[in-house]
């Protein structure tokens, strides 16, 4: 067993910070005398930890959870680039005990913008997640097997509505549907063959489909080679406080734009 | 002595005959109604067992164990190596046995206990119902407490801790009242207390949620008729801006980075100005 203990010692050796994901109060107390910085990452600070990063969604994927925790710590200057952090995390959900030790070096690659996207957006984090899920599912399966593109503008719906015009009758007129509802997700997929953008309010209400966005496109910083859909999505986020989530028809990637810039790019196949 | 032997053969019954004869004598000696009573008793016990088993299966199938998981009653039951479902099933078995015993005694016509049993016969079902009501009341109370506590968990205020307990004891109180009423205890004073309590709750809730109810009523109209929607420019109560959100209770109007959250009844009371350019 010596080698196993050695390996564990190596793993936690001279770590700059320890991230505890959803620890119990008693578990957290055991770290009281430690020299290394202890950062608690959880959905709410119910154990009164000193350094705390809020997790707006319970990420099932452990990599996402860790990435989110580290980005949150980076955002609050709790850790800095080049640090080595050790994450204690529960992989097999039900048990509150933290059953895994993961060592991560904080560098460029960890910074995907996912923390910023969820926490600093105008819309509710859960709405952003739901829209992401629809976009990812659409990217995986396409519409009846064919790849489709889609553009979702989330948050600041009032302003977005004023900076766009209808291409045709709004199918969501006088309806009260919210993203995240399973049936609504099916509806969104069906309507994705329509041209134009979906506009979703801060609380997740689908305000409209079939919208032609009319933002001023100057000063938009998006990579060359992306099409009109990305340009429109990127530009509307510069004019308003909305977040645009775009599924590309040509390469099948899901991209998120904020303040006129690309903040996140993920491949649905890997998700 | 052939004659003697014949005599004996004539008088003494054959061994097989002896048994039949004594048993038939015995059978004749015992009155029919005793047999009937015994029969009733046996049927009662078998029935009790079957009902107990069926009851347990039905309750388990209906998902009762999962529903009441974690309630205080269930936990106490678990400590005694049993469960609520087992207790209820056993109770129903005992009840049937008790009824069978009473029926058997009545059929057997045991006179000196007649008077005593006549009272018991009417009392047993009541006690049974009272017990069931009490168990259901306590379990439902526990469950209600858990549910309310869960809903309030996001509200991190120590004051809300009293609410789940109040809910629990209200349910238990009503159950106890029903149970006491069943066994014939005078519960008038307790009912008056319950009435006062209910009135107090209704009045307080009405007072506390007056504005919320008004806002919700106006909100229903706004959601159904949609006089304005997301993206419209409106003026409500001297607030001019773009509608960002309309939900059941509030309307969000944004002007120059300021988002005004207006309760829907003010929208209704003050009227809406739709601005079209």
Image (tube, coloured by chain):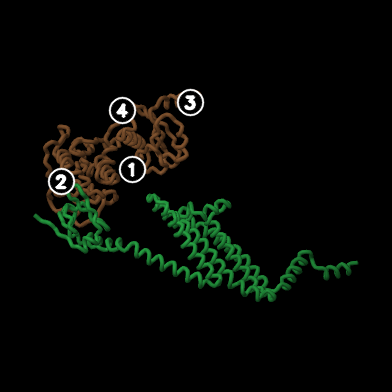
**Label of residue A196 in the image:** 2
Element assignment for label 4: loop
Badges 3 and 1, same chain: yes
Q: Which mark is residue A86?
A: none
Q: Nearer the viewer, residue A157 or B104?
A: A157
Q: Earlier in the sequence, mark 2 or mark 1?
A: 1
Identify the residue under disc 4: A81
Residue at the outermost right position: B1
Determine whether the residue tagged by mark 3 lies in a helix, strand or loop: helix
Q: Is residue A146 visible?
A: no
- Sequence-first tag of 4 and 1: 1
How much space separates mark 3 and mark 4, taking CA atoms? 28 Å
Left/right of residue A67 with respect to residue B61 in the rendered view: left
Mark in front: 2 vs 1: 1
Q: Quadrant of the C terminus of chain A?
A: top left
Q: Which chain is green?
A: B
**Which residue carries the number 1 mark?**
A57
Question: What is the drawing colour of chain A?
Answer: brown
Tags 4 and 2 both on a single chain: yes
Q: Chain ID for label 3?
A: A
Labels 3 and 2 within one chain: yes
Q: Earlier in the sequence, mark 3 or mark 1?
A: 3
Label 2 crowd bin: few (<14), some (14–19), many (20+), radius 10 Å? many
Of residues B80 and A124, the one drawn nearer to the viewer in this rendering: A124
Residue at mark 4 shares a chain with residue at mark 1: yes
List x then y, in percent, for residue B86. Answer: 55, 56
> Label 1: how many residues lie within 10 Å, few (<14), some (14-19) or many (20+)?
some
State the CA–CA distance, disc 3 to disc 2: 58 Å
């Amino acid at each position: 067993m010596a080698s196993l203990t050695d390996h564990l010692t190596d793993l936690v050796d001279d770590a700059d910070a320890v991230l505890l994901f959803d620890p119990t109060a008693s578990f957290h107390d055991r770290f009281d005398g430690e020299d290394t910085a202890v950062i608690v990452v959880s959905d709410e600070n119910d154990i009164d930890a000193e350094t705390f990063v809020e997790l707006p969604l319970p990420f099932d994927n452990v990599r996402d959870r860790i990435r989110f925790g580290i980005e949150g710590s980076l955002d609050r200057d709790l850790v800095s680039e080049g640090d080595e952090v050790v994450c204690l995390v529960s992989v097999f959900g039900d048990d509150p005990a933290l059953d895994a030790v993961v060592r991560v070096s904080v560098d460029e690659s960890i910074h995907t913008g996912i923390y910023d996207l969820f926490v600093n957006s105008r819309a509710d984090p859960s709405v952003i997640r739901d829209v992401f899920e629809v976009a990812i599912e659409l990217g995986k399966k396409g519409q009846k097997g064919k790849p489709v593109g889609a553009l979702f503008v989330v948050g600041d719906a009032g302003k977005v509505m004023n900076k766009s015009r209808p291409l045709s009758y709004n199918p969501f007129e006088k309806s009260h549907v919210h993203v995240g509802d399973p049936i609504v997700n099916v509806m969104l997929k069906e309507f994705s063959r329509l041209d134009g953008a979906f506009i979703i309010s801060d609380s997740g209400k689908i305000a409209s489909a079939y919208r032609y966005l009319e933002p001023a496109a100057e000063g938009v910083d998006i990579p060359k080679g992306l099409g009109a859909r990305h340009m429109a999505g990127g530009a509307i986020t510069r004019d308003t406080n909305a977040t645009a989530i775009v599924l590309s028809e040509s390469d099948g990637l899901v991209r998120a734009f904020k303040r006129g810039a690309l903040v996140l790019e993920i491949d649905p196949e890997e998700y | 002595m052939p004659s003697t032997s014949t005599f004996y053969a004539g008088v003494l019954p054959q061994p097989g005959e002896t048994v039949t004869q004594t048993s038939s004598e015995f059978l004749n000696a015992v009155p029919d109604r005793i047999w009937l009573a015994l029969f009733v008793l046996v049927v009662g016990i078998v029935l009790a067992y079957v009902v107990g088993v069926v009851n347990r299966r039905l309750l388990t199938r209906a998902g009762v164990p999962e529903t009441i998981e974690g309630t205080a009653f269930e936990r106490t039951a678990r400590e005694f190596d049993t469960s609520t479902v087992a207790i209820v099933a056993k109770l129903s078995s005992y009840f049937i046995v008790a009824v069978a015993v009473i029926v058997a005694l009545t059929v057997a016509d045991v006179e000196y206990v007649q008077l005593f049993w006549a009272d018991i016969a009417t009392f047993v079902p009541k006690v049974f119902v009272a017990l069931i009501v009490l168990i259901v009341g306590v379990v439902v109370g526990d469950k209600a407490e858990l549910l309310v506590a869960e809903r309030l968990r996001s509200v991190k205020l120590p004051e809300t801790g009293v609410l789940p307990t109040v809910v629990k004891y209200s349910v238990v109180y009503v159950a106890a009242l029903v149970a006491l009423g069943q066994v014939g205890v005078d519960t008038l004073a307790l009912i008056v207390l319950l009435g006062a309590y209910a009135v107090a709750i209704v009045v307080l809730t009405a007072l506390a949620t007056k504005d919320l109810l008004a806002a919700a009523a106006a909100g229903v109209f706004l959601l159904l008729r949609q006089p304005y929607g997301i993206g419209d420019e409106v003026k409500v109560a001297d607030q001019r801006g773009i509608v960002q959100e309309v939900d059941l209770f509030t309307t969000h109007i944004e002007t120059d980075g300021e988002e005004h959250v207006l309760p829907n009844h003010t929208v209704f009371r003050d009227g809406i100005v739709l601005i079209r350019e």
